[in-house]
Image (cartoon, rainbow, N blue to C red):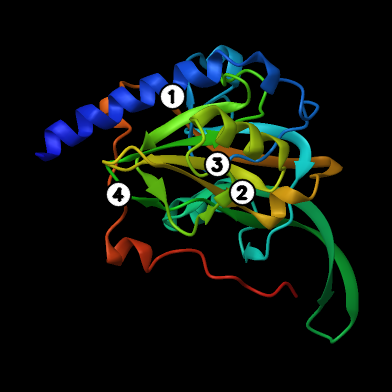
């Protein structure tokens, strides 16, 4: 099968999968609408509804909440934090909040000073697979996400967990199980040439815990204007790009 044929087949499967998710109303209501930080770039069809690009180009804002992350940078303002996220290939967002930190002046006197803290959020890494389609969990107001999911791409991501109980089950079963699990941030449904199907979930421990609420805290998550499916079919990054992935740092 040529690459172009494989891509067309994957798109056809993705469209069928999208219809399958939309047609099952029993998937509604597994969680209240508490934002679940996306681990991919969400597609925005209306900036007025999503706020995509409202504060920062290519980001939408979640006000008053932040998610735990050990990927802290030395940025002291929003712009610098955004730039740090842009330099890391698998960064999909960042949180900015104020905190008190111990300081010392030139005379050695110690004091506490309020400073901005910037933490980055790690995203899923795409992986080629022309027999798979993947959906990202999307529990954010304003985005067009049918039953809590948005089609991501024809392919998969790295480090998925096969849900063996869902072998040979339809796509919507895979989606429903992911939706019930707050740690699950996306799923892949794969069909072999023999017709066997497999479900893979992708989990993030920081998403498993509810976000913390804090006055003045802001989380920015990457977004993009919706485009045709053909542009979603991205190949995984090169080895050079992957080498620039986030490196965990220890908070002082």
Please, what secondary structure does the residue beneath circle 4 have?
loop
Q: Nearer the viewer, mark 1 or mark 2?
A: 1
Q: Identify the image quadrant of residue 191.
A: top left
Give the answer, above or below, for where 54 lies relative to 61: above
User: Mark 3 or 1 closer to N-term?
Assistant: 1
Which of the pair 244/106 is nearer the observer? 244
Residue drawn at 29 percent across, 41 percent down = 194
Q: Nearer the viewer, mark 2 or mark 4?
A: 4
Residue hosting label 1: 17
Please, what secondary structure does the residue beneath circle 1 have?
helix
Please, what secondary structure does the residue beneath circle 3 have?
strand
Give the answer, above or below, for where 18 lies relative to 170: above
Q: Cα distance, mark 4 to mark 3? A: 16 Å
Residue hosting label 4: 128
Q: How many marks?
A: 4
Q: Identify the image quadrant of residue 23.
A: top right
Which circle marks residue 186 in the picture?
A: 3
Asked if the residue at tag 1 contacts the one at tag 4, i.e. Cβ–Cβ closer than 8 Å, the answer is no
Q: Cα distance, mark 3 to mark 2? A: 19 Å
Residue 222: where, in percent of width, then height?
52, 38
Residue hosting label 2: 94
Please, what secondary structure does the residue beneath circle 2 have?
strand
Which of the pair 143/26 is nearer the observer? 26
Q: Residues within 10 Å of mark 3 (few under 14, many from 20)?
A: many
The residue sitting at the bottom extreme is 108
Residue drawn at 29 percent across, 26 percent down = 11
């Amino acid at each position: 099968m040529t690459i172009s044929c494989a891509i067309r087949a994957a798109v056809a499967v993705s469209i069928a999968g999208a219809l399958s998710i939309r047609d099952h109303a029993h998937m509604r209501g597994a969680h209240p609408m508490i934002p679940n930080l996306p681990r991919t770039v969400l597609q925005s069809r209306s900036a007025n509804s999503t706020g995509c690009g409202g504060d920062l180009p290519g980001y939408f804002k979640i006000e008053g909440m932040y998610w735990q992350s050990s990927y802290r940078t030395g940025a002291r303002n929003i712009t610098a934090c955004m730039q740090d996220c842009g330099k890391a290939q698998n960064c999909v967002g960042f949180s900015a909040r104020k905190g008190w930190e111990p300081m010392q002046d030139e005379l050695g006197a110690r004091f506490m000073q309020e400073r901005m803290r910037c933490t980055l959020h790690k995203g899923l890494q795409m992986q080629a697979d022309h027999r798979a389609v993947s959906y990202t969990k999307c529990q954010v107001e304003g985005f067009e996400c049918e039953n809590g999911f948005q089609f991501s791409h024809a392919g998969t991501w790295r480090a998925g967990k096969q849900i063996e109980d869902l072998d040979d089950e339809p796509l919507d079963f895979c989606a429903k199980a992911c939706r019930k699990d707050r740690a699950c941030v996306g799923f892949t449904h794969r069909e072999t040439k023999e017709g066997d199907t497999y479900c893979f979930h992708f989990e993030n421990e920081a998403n498993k815990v509810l976000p913390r609420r804090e006055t003045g805290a802001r989380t920015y998550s990457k977004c993009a204007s919706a485009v045709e499916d053909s542009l979603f079919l991205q190949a995984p990054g090169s080895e050079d790009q992957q080498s620039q992935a986030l490196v965990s740092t220890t908070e002082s």
